[in-house]
Image (tube, helix red, strand yellow):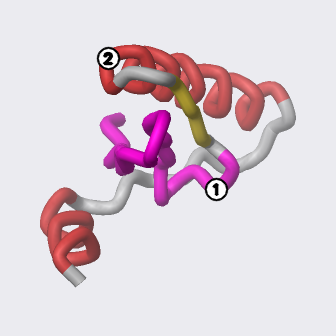
Amino acid sequence: MSYAIIIEKGETSYGAYVPDLPGCVAVAETREEVEFLIKEAIQFHLEMLQAENLPIPTPTPNEANAKRSLN
């Protein structure tokens, strides 16, 4: 499964989140670091959901994510 990742540049850092996985976030000083950290966060988030026998959200299709980013 492939989830959309939103990366935002702040004044002194980068933030990333996954719209389909509420609470799955990362913050870092560089874009490269935040990309690495959000991928780790996704893996951990999915493992936690599985361990708790909770449903794994289906990723939103890419077309819907593109439209959401443009609005």
Which residue is painted at 24% across and 60% down in the image? 61
Q: Where is residue 70 in the image (x, y as percent from the top left)?
A: 17, 76
Residue 22 marker = 1
Question: Could you give the CA–CA distance between mark 1 and mark 2, rounded to whole angstroms?
Answer: 22 Å
Q: How crowded is mark 1: few (under 14 residues within 10 Å), some or many (20 or more)?
A: few
Residue type marked 2: Glu
Q: Position of residue 69 (x, y in %)?
A: 24, 69
**Label 1 residue SS:** loop
Q: Position of residue 57 (x, y in %)?
A: 54, 53
Region of the chain picked out in magenta, as a range: 1-23
Which residue is painted at 62% across and 31% down in the image? 46
Which SS does the magenta portion mostly show?
loop
Residue in the foreground of this view, choosing between 16 and 47: 16
Q: In which quarter of the image is residue 52?
A: top right
Identify the residue under disc 2.
32
Give the mark, 1 or 2, whose residue is nearer the N terminus.
Answer: 1
**Label 2 residue SS:** helix
Q: Residues within 10 Å of mark 2 (few under 14, many from 20)?
A: few
The N terminus: image quadrant: top left
7 is higher (above) or lower (below) than 51 = below
Residue at the right extreme?
52
Q: Quadrant of residue 32?
A: top left
The C terminus: image quadrant: bottom left
Per the image, is 62 magenta?
Answer: no
Per the image, is 2 magenta?
Answer: yes
Residue at the bottom extreme?
71
1 is higher (above) or lower (below) than 34 = below
Which residue is painted at 25% across and 65% down in the image? 65
